[in-house]
Image (cartoon, coloured by chain):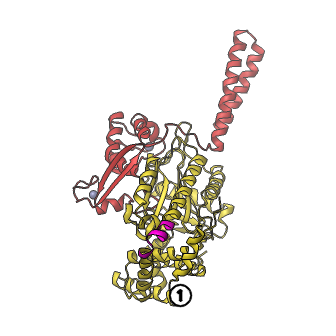
Chain colours: A red, B yellow
């Protein structure tokens, strides 16, 4: 039996794992199992292996000829490495990644830790929404003095957000 | 701190003092983080990797947790030194292969180790003895919170922390524990346990091998997914599963004492005999035999004060540790000789297995380990 990764050496490492009720099998040669970190206790995950094998095609479907504007990464690179190029790649290849992440994880949305910075952004966003709707109301009611003051507040908030 | 100090002190987790330490060797939690809009280490050119390293390294070194730390660029470590760090689980095998543009920073107690430009810009890992996933998470979470005030981490409101590999996206967290399960292996129940654990989305694998061929009866259990579940939930779920496995291991040991005592004493006696008299031993054979002696200590066949020398041999007989301590590069044959020699020397003052002591333990029907909850 040939190795699933390089498809040229004989497979010597056979992995079977049941993930969310689905049985998955991967056969690897010595070299590929080492490279994929099967012998490395910190690095191993089966999904990791599968990524390099079936997942790249999944991405290709979503973005046939896309290139990340920030790092220049393409789906061909993903196919080769099983890794992405930068954080913006998650936006660039979001279409193909969606189904991949769904198959790989428990959920599709992060419910864990929020960085302080994200807290602040959410807060600013909420305040901005409130001010904007107040402004619309003031304009509609032709309450121009209030509208002017609201515009100033929005401007200040935008400045704060930019920092 | 110099590398020789790292060698000499030994990690806190190696001393085996945590809860359930007889069965749970260590608990580890690692978080993966990346800088916003910068190429991940595997994709970044050397110049960008170095620039990112220069941005991150000083921020890590100034952490209060990193006072008197060991901080080294990967290109300044020898292959052997890197391997020693791998054998102590302070860096990954993947990181050991890195050179220019990567670094490792760890605290003196070796409970916190931070890899810069491994697969992600930051891999922060906390390691504790025994079953202490919660406190390991707490430490690494605190470090993450301190760092995020100074570094702009890649974070998406829907996907969470963005990582080089999509398998880590979300929490970026991998929590794992290393378990010593000779009872389940000898009673041939280990496969059932592995299957059951896999079914609930957790990964189990042999530490140095695969499946049941795990060397030294050592297994690692960890969370498989990182998206759609809170960090604390993952840690609690994993801890509960591990507590169940600990119970199963105790049950298996009691069963062996009661129903297969001949096989058990034969194994312990043979392990003792070979370790005490052999003149050549591979790393695999050493781990497997030491595992049986460790089981013997757990069961009371050897005195409790013999536990530490055995635990130390698990690490000290690894290839890089052997060569580092002998100050020279050795081929496989020379290593096998030296390994056997070191084991013989350390076991010189080791008493013969005393089975009568074990019988007492099983009459009480209780496991010798105190059941402390985390
Ligand atoms: Zn291969
Ligand atoms: Zn990119």
Q: Is residue A92 above or below residue A48?
A: above
Q: Is any atom of residue B124 visible in this view?
A: no
Most foreground residue, B348 or A91: B348
The residue at 36%/39% (across/down) is A59
Ligand 1 within 8 angstroms of badge 1 C-beta:
no
Left or right of B373, for residue A79: left
The image quadrant of residue B68 is bottom right
Check disc 1 and report the residue beneath it. B351
Name the dominant secondary structure of the magenta segment: helix
Q: Position of residue B168 (x, y in %)?
A: 48, 48
**Residue B182 lies in the magenta-colored region:** no
Residue B96: quarter of image:
bottom left
Tell me if residue A48 comes above or below residue A89 in the rendering: below
Q: Position of residue B105 (x, y in %)?
A: 57, 65
Question: In the image, residue A79 lies at what x, y percent?
Answer: 33, 46
| Residue at x 37%, y 85% (from the top left corner) | B280
- A84, B45: nearer the viewer: A84
Q: Quadrant of ligand 1?
A: bottom left
Quarter the N terminus of chain A occupies: bottom left
Residue at horizontal 52%, vertical 39%?
B159
Task: Give the total number of marks visible in the rendering.
Answer: 1
For the C terminus of chain A, give its image quadrant.
top right
Q: Return the residue nearer the eye: A148 or B340.
A: B340
Which residue extends farthest top? A141
Can the viewer see residue B38? yes
Q: Which residues are magenta?
A: B253-262
SS of the residue under disc 1: loop
Position above or below: B236 against B13: above
Q: Is residue B236 above or below residue B306?
A: above
Chain bearing mark 1: B
Reply yes or no: does residue B259 show up in magenta.
yes
Which x, y percent locates residue A131?
A: 70, 23
């Amino acid at each position: 039996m040939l190795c699933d990764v390089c498809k040229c050496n004989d497979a010597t490492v056979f992995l079977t794992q049941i993930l969310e009720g689905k049985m998955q099998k991967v056969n690897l040669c010595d070299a590929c199992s080492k490279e994929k970190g099967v012998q490395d206790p910190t690095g191993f995950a089966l999904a990791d292996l599968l990524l390099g094998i079936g997942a790249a095609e999944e991405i290709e479907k979503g973005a046939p000829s896309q290139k990340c504007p920030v790092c220049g990464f393409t789906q061909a690179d993903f196919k080769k490495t099983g890794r992405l190029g930068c954080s913006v790649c998650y936006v660039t290849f979001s279409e193909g990644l969606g189904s991949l992440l769904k198959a790989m994880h428990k959920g599709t949305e992060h419910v864990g830790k929020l960085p302080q910075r994200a807290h602040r952004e959410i807060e600013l966003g909420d305040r901005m929404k409130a001010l904007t709707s107040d402004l619309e109301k003031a304009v509609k009611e032709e309450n121009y003095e209030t509208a002017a003051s609201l515009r100033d507040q929005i401007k200040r908030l935008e400045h704060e957000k930019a920092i | 701190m110099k590398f020789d100090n790292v060698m000499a002190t030994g990690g806190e987790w190696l001393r085996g003092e945590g809860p359930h330490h007889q069965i749970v060797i260590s608990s580890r939690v690692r978080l993966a983080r990346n800088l916003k809009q910068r190429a991940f280490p595997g994709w970044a050119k050397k110049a960008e990797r170095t620039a990112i390293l220069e941005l991150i390294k000083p921020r890590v070194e100034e952490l209060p947790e990193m006072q008197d730390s060991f901080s080294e660029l990967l290109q300044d470590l020898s292959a052997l030194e890197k391997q020693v760090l791998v054998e102590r689980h302070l860096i990954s095998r993947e990181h050991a292969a890195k050179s220019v543009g990567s670094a490792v920073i760890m605290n003196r107690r070796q409970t916190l180790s931070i890899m810069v430009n491994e697969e992600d810009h930051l891999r922060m890992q906390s390691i504790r003895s025994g079953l202490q996933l919660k406190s390991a998470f707490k430490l690494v979470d605190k470090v993450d919170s301190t760092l995020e005030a100074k570094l702009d981490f890649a974070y998406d409101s829907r996907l969470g922390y963005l990582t080089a590999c999509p398998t880590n996206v979300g929490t970026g967290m991998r929590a794992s524990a290393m378990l010593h399960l000779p009872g389940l292996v000898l009673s041939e129940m280990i496969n059932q346990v592995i299957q059951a654990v896999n079914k609930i989305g957790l990964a189990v694998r042999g530490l140095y091998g695969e499946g049941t061929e795990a060397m030294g009866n050592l297994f690692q259990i960890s969370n498989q997914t990182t998206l759609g579940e809170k960090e604390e939930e993952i840690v609690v779920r994993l801890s509960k599963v591990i507590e169940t496995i600990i119970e199963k291991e105790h049950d298996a040991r009691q069963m062996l004492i009661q129903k297969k005592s001949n096989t058990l004493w034969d194994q312990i006696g043979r392990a003792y005999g070979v370790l005490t008299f052999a003149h050549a031993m591979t790393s695999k054979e050493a781990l497997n035999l030491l595992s049986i002696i460790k089981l013997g200590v757990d069961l009371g066949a050897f005195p409790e004060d013999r536990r530490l020398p055995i635990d130390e041999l698990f690490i000290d007989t690894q290839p890089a540790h052997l060569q580092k301590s002998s100050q020279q590069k050795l081929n496989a044959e020379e290593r096998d000789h030296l390994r056997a020699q070191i084991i013989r020397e350390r076991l010189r003052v080791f008493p013969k297995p005393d089975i009568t002591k074990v019988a007492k333990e099983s009459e009480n029907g209780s496991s010798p380990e105190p059941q402390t909850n985390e």
